[in-house]
Image (cartoon, helix red, strand yellow):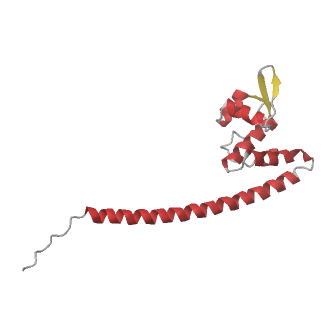
Amino acid sequence: MIDALSSVLSPRFGAPASEERPGRFTIHDLVAEFGITARTLRFYEEKGLLTPERRGLERLYSRRDRARLKLVLMGKSVGFSLEEVRDMLDLYDLGDGQATQLTVALTRFEDKLLELEARRRDIDRAHAELSHARDIVRARLAALAEPEPPRHARPR
């Protein structure tokens, strides 16, 4: 999935990888490319999602780390937890040509789509109810703002 899925992700999750890109990236490279903070990168490292090489105080991220970061950001943006993302990424190392990883990813993606569709229906229903209530309140306020017609005095 790291190679297979990172190639199909939206361009907003970093520039497309090319053969011309170096094999190592500094924290500054990834911060600039993905529009995230160095603190975010260090957090993902603490969580075991990225494993940069250390040279003194400098962190050097591999192409694999870059691809994993891209997948983490994509996963987070569509509602996956970091734990769910890590579980999918960890399947990469099974050595089965990514078949298990891709199968699990497909299942999780389909489940997430069903979840999002249900949430969309709930939001659409809430939107319709709130719009209806708003229209009633507007009509009542408009009625209150209209001057009352003059009352004709009845002869006694």
- Of the 4 image quadrants, the one containing the C terminus is bottom left
Where residue 136 appears, as percent x and y from the top left, is 39, 66
On the question of residue 76 being in view, the answer is yes
Between 88 and 5, the one nearer to me in the picture: 88
Give the residue at the far left of this rendering: 156
Instruction: Give the x, y percent position of residue 92.
Output: 86, 46
Number of numbered markers: 0
Q: Is residue 150 left or right of residue 25?
A: left
Quarter occupied by residue 49: top right
Q: Residue furthest toward the front?
A: 156
Residue pushed farthest bottom?
156
> Who's the residue at 28% across and 63% down the image?
144
- Give the answer, above or below, for where 154 lies relative to 107: below
Horizontal and vertical percent for residue 113? 69, 59
Residue 18 visible in the picture: no
Question: Is 153 in front, or is 156?
Answer: 156
The residue sitting at the top extreme is 56
Residue at 77% across, 26% down? 59
> Which residue is rendered at x = 62% and y = 60% of the image?
119
Please provide percent x and percent y for residue 135. Answer: 40, 64
Would you place residue 143 above or below residue 75 in this image? below
